[in-house]
Amino acid sequence: MTELAMKEPAMTPGPHVRLSDLAIDPYPILARLRETTPVAWVAETRMWFVTRRADVLSVLRDPETYRTDSPRSTIRDTFGTQMLSAEGDLHRRYKSQCNPPFNMRSVQSHAMPLITAHTDALIDAFGNQRSADLRPAIASQLAVFTVASMLGIPPHLHARILDWYASFAAALANFTWDEQVRARGHASAREFQDAITPVLHDLHHAADPSLLGALSRAGPARLTDPEIISNALIVLFGGIETTESTILNVMWTLLSHPAALAAIRGNWSLLPAAIEEAMRWEPAVQSCTRHLEQPATLHGTTLPAGATVQCMLGAANRDPAHFPDPDRYDMTRANAGDHLSFGAGKHFCLGAALAGAEVQVAATRLLQRCPALRLDPDRPSAPRGFEFRAPPTLHVLVA
């Protein structure tokens, strides 16, 4: 066991929770924790699970007590110090410099035309085929293309991105600190740095609107090359993981609810609310991790210094105290937009507007251009995963 892994505290064990069970269907398990043990020690992860929405919000909105910056952070261990594992002035410095390409105005004016054109090209590619798997055909390619374009990663490197991403996904969910998984994550981060550093220097002399271009020309306040690379890594990973999985989860949800889908086809103005509800009902990212430097009390439970807290977003999104009948998908739900699927507080997802645009365009263009689109009954799938959650495949019939 690596020294970075937290030892189990000397206390009565909490409810028995297995990651393998969470990966299949987390919601009944999380509901039980929310009702009986809203702050629960989960031995397999060596973390505390927080499952009530109010408690999750209190943690995410208190960065002084519940910090992202810790040597026990798998994100910091894999990517180094960047906006998601920094606090205070350093966090503000990183996020303020990285924010401009991802604000709503920039997304609408610059990213939306790229997203729409690329989505249509991807749909054209499977043309008159009877069937398709939406993961490789749409979700993966759109997510990689969009975030790479926003970052300024040249096309000849796009094929390597998914290889890096697979290592990063395993490393960030490596809560048992498996050394081989860590090593693969570190190796991919070094490969990314070696590939992107020359690009960064080239963009310094170009009038390029991408994130790497803007960061390379930031003047006296410019981040160092290692800082730019680390922040680009977290943007790259988040831009793929959150977006690809959200597209898949939203499409799976819509196609699994034929009555809702029929209503949308009869009135396209219903689609944005249907997407918000899908993101509440089946979030792609199931948790946000925080760390304690000092003891704290949460919902009557004393958490020791050094504790790691998992804010379970999937549980918060189905808390009946805020969402009546929460396990039911209801696209007319008035407060569906209150979901926490992009986090909350100072570390709210930088790319939320961009991801939302990609999901909106992908769902709209697929449903409008493929009026017979439906799940393939011979190749069923469903979301899987305890940390990052999406259908491994999403086979559909197109015609």
Image: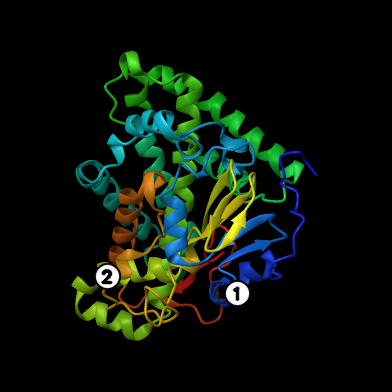
Out of 347 and 309, give the one closest to the viewer.
309
SS at mark 2? helix
Mark 1, residue position:
29
Residue at horizontal 34%, vertical 59%? 359
Q: Does residue 80 sit above or below 362 in this rendering? A: above
Q: CA–CA distance between discs 1 and 2?
A: 27 Å
- Density class for disc 2 (Cα within 10 Å; few <14, some 14-19, many ≥20) is some
The residue at 53%/26% (across/down) is: 195
Which x, y percent locates residue 71? 63, 36
Instruction: State the quadrant of the N terminus.
Output: top right
Residue at image location 67% in from the left, 51% down from the top: 175
**Badge number at residue 273:** 2
Amino acid at pointer 1: Ile
For residue 83, the mark is none
- Crowding near pointer 1: few (<14 within 10 Å), some, many (20+)? some
Q: Secondary structure at mark 1?
A: helix
Of circles 1 and 2, the one toward us is 1
At label 2, the amino acid type is Ala
Of mark 1 and mark 2, the one earlier in the sequence is 1
Q: Quadrant of the C terminus?
A: bottom left
Residue 294 in the image: x percent, y percent?
59, 43
Where's residue 31, x and y in %? 54, 76
Report the side of 385 relative to 101 (left or right). Answer: right
Is residue 205 visible in the rendered image? The answer is no
- Position of residue 68 relative to residue 389, above or below, is above
Find residue 325 and report its image quarter. bottom left
Left or right side of 14 for 236: left
Q: Where, by quadrant of the figure, is residue 373 drawn?
A: bottom left
Q: Nearer the viewer, residue 122 or 171?
A: 171
120 or 179: nearer the eye? 179
Q: What is the x, y in percent for residue 222?
A: 37, 18
Q: Note whether 167 is above or below 330 in the view shown.
A: above
